[in-house]
Amino acid sequence: MANPTEDKPLPPLHGTALVLLTIAVAFSTFMEVLDMTIVNVAVPHIAGSLGVSASEGTWTISSYSLASAIMQPLTGWIARRFGEVKTFVVSVGLFVVFSMMCGLATSMPMLVFARLMQGAGSGPMVALSLTLLLASYPKTKQGIALALWAMTVVVAPIFGPILGGWLTDNFSWPWIFYINLPVGILAGVITWTLLRKRETKTFQSPIDVIGLVLLVVGVGSLQFMLDNGNDHDWFSSPMIITLGLIALICLVFLVVWELHAKHPVVELGLFKERNFTAGVVALSLGMFAFFGINVVFPLWLQTTLGYTATWAGLATAPVGILAFLLSPILGRNMHRLELRAVVTFAFVVFAATSYWFSTYDSSASFNSLVWPRFVMGIAIPCFFIPLNQIYLAGLPAHEIASASGLANFFRTLGSSVSTAVTVTLWQHRGILHHATLTENVTSASQPATQVLSQLTHGGSSQTQALGIVDQLVNREALTLAVNDIFLLCAILFIVLIPVIWLAKPPFGSAGGAAGH
């Protein structure tokens, strides 16, 4: 089944073939990551069209991330069993088929099932896209491959809400799924045509059934708990407590079982590598802080400052400009740089821009909010690209798929935990600030009585005036709460700096991670 021999690996691709493969793989990665966020802005439309509540509509988001999170750590095992090229192409095919099913869905259960299968199909795509790129590029240009790959993974979630909003407003919500069809077919056909003769060796390793069950139940419970915890007031809900306990028990048993299994379904042994551990910890916690900012910022704009979904997207988008421009330059010069210093620089910029955000009040203009987003873009390639190289450094080629899958799983988990924690924290801090500010709205407070008298003189009744003041207090309370989140993220970025220095050089030549 496997064409290349261990003795004589096939030479890297060159010229047009390499350009075509890069486009195909980059677009399939872009499409997969885009689908994580493109649905976010369409949830109200989907819920309305299928006759369900908005909270039920969020199942379209959670079902996708749930299935994707379960499949990511399995990538290495599936690729070893069936071959990396075949797994990637089948993954793209399944993604496209179930994307069409999502668009054609006529009921919520049908859409949730299609999204679940779409997520399962997409799981191996991101990790294998990186593995195939590294294997196909000449060793001296693997830094560029990493840069192009990281660029698509970073830019896609930013463009997701904008593209999703535009398609939903101008066409209808099924089009956010239909656009995957041409991209997916082209990506699958090009990849298969160029790489089918370069299939990796396959091994008929037996299925670790116990590990697989523990993974599915553990990760499934955890993801479901994170996605629905906020709606059910977290641990005051018996359902959330049950899910948390199931997740804890299954994941603890999974770790113990996989460390001693003869043919583990998840390669936890990779954490014995110092660089892999340091890189993945920095990536996961860095993603936690980065994603937290990206979740709370547009929420604050829409719920507190009255921005529309499109304008909130436009205020968020400038972060992608410098990231897009700098990624290829950084990738080309990776071998000249001290990667730990580059990641440190990224954390410093992230911390500085997060602190900058924490100084804004509710009167901040659109232009002033765009600037820190724009500057933050410098840090994105400096964070993602070197970290990929650091955690893959020194690993043999046959472990790259497993390592990439496991790292992507922790990156996804970091994002999921971040969404749950930051949104909950924002709401709780908002309530606390509201209570504190309300203490100042008394007859003894001159500013409060002045505002109330102005409102009553303007024709409002006493009750209406108090209602308006309450809205003003709430606006300021949620703004102070968002400032707290940004400040916490800034502190986390600074705390993460020593973690990356636990990794040890050398990190290979440009992209030497894959070189063995």
Image (spheres, grey):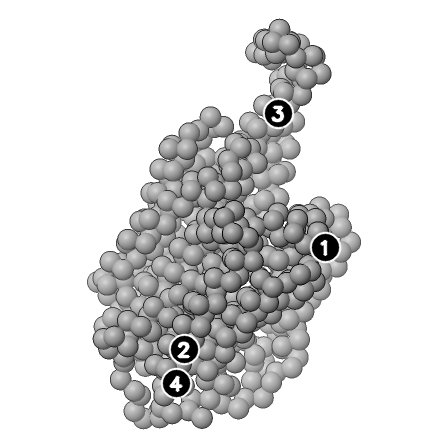
Residue in view at x 53 percent, y 91 percent: 204
109 left or right of 2? right
Q: Can you tell which of label 4 and label 1 is closer to the viewer?
A: 4
- Which comes before the other along the chain, label 3 or label 4? 4
Q: Amino acid at mark 2?
A: Val
Q: Which residue is mark 1?
A: 240
Q: Which residue is mark 3?
A: 471
The location of residue 249, given as percent across then percent down, is 69, 66
- Which comes before the other along the chain, label 2 or label 3? 2
Q: Is residue 398 above or below residue 39?
A: below
Tell me if I can see residue 325 in this picture. Answer: yes
Q: Can you tell which of label 2 and label 3 is closer to the viewer?
A: 2
Residue in view at x 69 percent, y 12 percent: 461
The location of residue 164, given as percent across then percent down, is 50, 52
Q: Is residue 60 above or below residue 267?
A: above
Instruction: Check disc 3 and report its element: helix, strand or loop.
Output: helix
Question: Do residues under tags 2 and 3 come within 8 Å of each other at their CB atoms?
Answer: no
Q: Amino acid at mark 1?
A: Ile
Residue in view at x 64 percent, y 71 percent: 216
Query: How many numbered markers are drawn?
Result: 4
Q: What distance separates the C-alpha of mark 2 from that of mark 4? A: 10 Å
Nearest the camera: 283 or 310? 310
Q: Which residue is mark 2?
A: 189
Instruction: Check disc 1 and report its element: helix, strand or loop.
Output: helix
Q: Which mark is residue 196?
A: 4
Q: What distance separates the C-alpha of mark 1 from that of mark 2? A: 43 Å
- Which comes before the other along the chain, label 1 or label 3? 1
